[in-house]
Image (cartoon, rainbow, N blue to C red):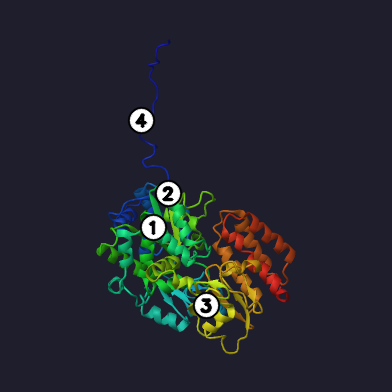
Amino acid sequence: MAPLDNTSGVWKSGRGKGRKTPKGRQLDDQAHSDILDLLGDRPRNRDLLIEFLHLVHDQFGHISAAHIRALSEEMRVGQAEIYEVASFYAHFDVVKEGETPPPALTIRVCDSLSCELAGAEQLKQALEDGMDPTQVRVLRAPCMGRCDTAPVLEIGHNHIDHASVAKVEAAIAAEDTHAHLPQYEDYRAYAIAGGYEVLKDLRANGDWEAVQDKVLSAGLRGLGGAGFPSGKKWGFVRMNEGPRYLAVNGDEGEPGTFKDRYYLERTPHVFLEGMLIAAWAVEAEKAFIYMRDEYPAVLEILRREIAALEAAGIVEEGYIDLRRGAGAYICGEESAMIESIEGKRGEPRHRPPFVAQVGVFGQPTLVHNVETLYWVTKINREGPECLNAVEKNGRKGLRSYSVSGRVKNPGVHLLPAGSTILDVIEAAGGMLDGHAFKAYQPGGPSSGLLPAHMDDIPLDFDTLQPHGSFIGSAAVVVLSDQDSARDAALNMLRFFEDESCGQCTPCRVGCEKAVNLMQAEKWDQDLLEELSAAMIDTSICGLGQAAPNPIRLTIKHFPEEV
């Protein structure tokens, strides 16, 4: 073996031009100090990324590159991954190096169908013309769940109902940019009236299968839109080995829907007790509540009342984990919501496996809508009769219809599930003076538009499918002879274009293509039908599959307009 070459030579000493810092963006001391102050002693868990991004955004009004770098340092998560998550959600303003941060004040003007009918476009234009763009930013925003008080806007976190330029100017002058809490039944009042007695009794002596049978006999179905029999889910989750979780889908983003907000702002503990009954039934180790960011008052109510439950010993500290959405309609899809709870982009998962088997953190998860859990409490307190004893037009049960548009008394109207659109309009005070009933959206944009002459169909599960529509979350918007069905359909498709998560090409490109085609003076109906068929057949989730409904139903029922 040859001896080592020990001859002298020229060697680099490590001094001189060598790197003194790691590659990439350097850690800024001030930004790191900011992040340490904001995070405090919170655990640096990966699933808390979105919560931490909210902390940064609330404090600074945007998320800078320096803060992303500092957050990356603390969480041991790549900067690209943090940027990827932050840029997915509409309520996070990510500011790159050299970019100017947004103004301190942002006004979001709702542009969904009910608000558009009430003059939101003109309001937004007037605000843009009258505000200093260096001080105030005016943006269009999707449905804020306040369709009964259209037009609506949000200034900071303060929602202004029946909005006007004068109201906005007054709010700015008063620096009134925070959420206003409505009067509601708190824990003490609820407990005095017998609240949580059912839960305590079930925990002590209950049989979960008997409770499941009671819920099934009441006829309760999922009220987020899918309509799956609620009790059946419990058995599906229980058959899988734990740990198990419960996740509440409070991302009520379907334009025209506001029933969940209505109940949470009045009787939050009816929902919370129902959630804890369902969690008991499936032996959930933790309950997550995913609540949309557009409901700041609800988020504050839930923070306070969860703390009251912990103080009263109803739940252990940390058992209920309240998570705040960030402006993504797609997170109303249950698997996308679970991705978001895990601190990721809210992109739907391929199924199977279903979330009852592989949900939050890969564990069996029971997912329910807010109103569904509200009825779980009612059924266990009042008996299944509170739903199954009500019958109309051959349908059993009650529905919470969110009603808006050209009616005198928009709001949440609790009616028999067999009610027709004429019953709903009558409950809402009838049509506005000078307006004649022309068309209606029975269950949000996903359900499309039906003409006034189709007024004898019970607005319930399974009754609208033969007509190419469905009830969904019962978001009813009423149009009059002064409205254009074509314009309403375009409004719906623009919403889907904005809210497509972009994961699958048929939905991402299809929605954009549909909007372009629908803006033409005369619709290319053959091409739109071909596009609709492709989206329905090949989109991953319900957004892309339902987005063509407004197109197809407008062509079918309002051919003279297209």
* Quadrant occupied by the C terminus: bottom right
**Residue 434 position (above or below residue 59):** below
- Marker disc for residue 13: 4
Amino acid type at image mark 4: Ser
In this view, the residue in front, 349 or 396, is: 396
Residue 184 coordinates in the image, percent (x, y): 34, 76
The crowding category of the residue bearing disc 1, from other C-alpha atoms within 10 Å (few below 14, some 14 to 19, many at least 20), is some
Q: Which residue is mark 2?
A: 363
Cα separation between marks 2 and 1:
20 Å
Note whether residue 313 is visible: yes
Question: How many marks overall?
Answer: 4
Numbered disc 4: secondary structure: loop
In this view, the residue in front, 103 or 190, is: 190
Numbered disc 2: secondary structure: loop
**Residue 522 position (above or below residue 166):** above
Amino acid type at image mark 1: Trp
Q: Earlier in the sequence, mark 2 or mark 3?
A: 2
Q: Earlier in the sequence, mark 4 or mark 3?
A: 4
- Marker disc for residue 416: none
**Do the residues bearing badges 4 and 2 touch, measured as CB atoms within 8 Å?**
no
Amino acid type at image mark 2: Gln
Numbered disc 3: secondary structure: strand
**Do the residues bearing badges 1 and 4 touch, measured as CB atoms within 8 Å?**
no
Q: Earlier in the sequence, mark 1 or mark 3?
A: 1
The crowding category of the residue bearing disc 2, from other C-alpha atoms within 10 Å (few below 14, some 14 to 19, many at least 20), is some
**Residue at image location 35% in from the left, 67% down from the top:** 302
Cα separation between marks 1 and 4:
73 Å
Q: Which residue is mark 1?
A: 208
